[in-house]
Amino acid sequence: MKSILSTKKFSNSQKQLFLNSGLSLVEYDAINTEATDFELPSEKIKNAIFTSKNSVKAVLGKVEVEHCFCVGKKTADLLSENGFHIQEITDYGKDLGEIIVQKYPEESFIFFCGNKRRDEIPEILQGNKIDFKEIEVYKTSLNPKPFSQEFDGILFFSPSAVQSFTAENQLKDVTAFCIGKTTATEAKKHTNNIIIATKPSIENVIVQVVKYFKK
């Protein structure tokens, strides 16, 4: 039986996708996140950028936002469920930055982010002189754990998760399944056996794993 390690614990519905696949699954959280204390410029914000569910969770109940610009369907879904209006949604930060430059060059933005946020959005906005302010609303910390077991496939959902796993383990002959290009870039520092999800979602990563090992 092929053994799979996920660097993020799954929900019950996500685990269902593994059922009947004939794969054995080990899961743990390679990174920890916690909300931080932060100050808001006001209780009402016209345009806010969210790139993860963690940033949404950190501000829920604390601020009203007129227009939300977000990366990832799960981020947008969480905002919608809580009554926020989604103005724009993309799969990647770079794409969102470019849409803002093209369609909203005169607007100001608040970017709610974590301490390990990626550089694409700030660099694009700064480079095009778009007014924005970053507010750090959560912290990500690595949770390294050594494994004596060898795995056939490892699932990664962020560059931080790759860093956490490789702090205590090697990615020798294992296949790394990555949620997106930025995660894959980090994994490429350790292995060339990489498969990237066709859509940047946890469910799609699982689908890729099951398809790959059923061949």
Image (spheres, rainbow, N blue to C red):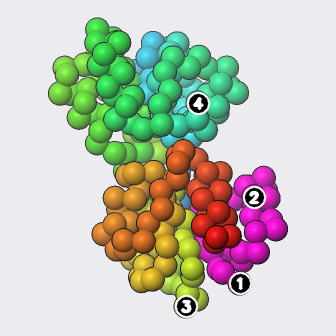
Asked whether the residues under the numbered discs 1 and 4 touch, taking CB atoms below 8 Å apart as contact, a structural biologist would say: no
Q: Earlier in the sequence, mark 3 or mark 1?
A: 1
Residue highlighted by disc 4: 76
**Spatial CA span between label 2 and label 1:** 17 Å
User: Alpha-carbon neighbours of circle 4 within 10 Å: few (<14), some, or many (≥20)?
Assistant: many
**Is 25 included in the stretch rendered in magenta?**
yes
**Spatial CA span between label 1 and label 4:** 37 Å
Of tags 1 and 4, the one toward the viewer is 1
Is the residue 213 above or below the residue 132 in the image?
below
Q: Magenta part of the protein: which range?
A: 1-27
Residue highlighted by disc 2: 17
Q: Report helix, strand or loop for mark 3.
A: loop
Quadrant containing the N terminus in the rendered view: bottom right
Residue highlighted by disc 3: 148
Q: Is residue 211 left or right of residue 87?
A: right
Q: Earlier in the sequence, mark 2 or mark 4?
A: 2
User: Alpha-carbon neighbours of circle 1 within 10 Å: few (<14), some, or many (≥20)?
Assistant: few
Asked whether the residues under the numbered discs 3 and 4 touch, taking CB atoms below 8 Å apart as contact, a structural biologist would say: no
Residue plotted at (25% across, 19% down): 130
**Is 209 included in the stretch rendered in magenta?**
no
Residue 1 is tagged as 1
| Residue 167 visible in the snapshot | yes
**Spatial CA span between label 2 and label 3:** 26 Å
Quadrant containing the C terminus in the rendered view: bottom right
Of tags 2 and 4, the one toward the viewer is 2
**Spatial CA span between label 2 and label 4:** 23 Å
Q: Position of residue 58 (x, y in %)?
A: 55, 38
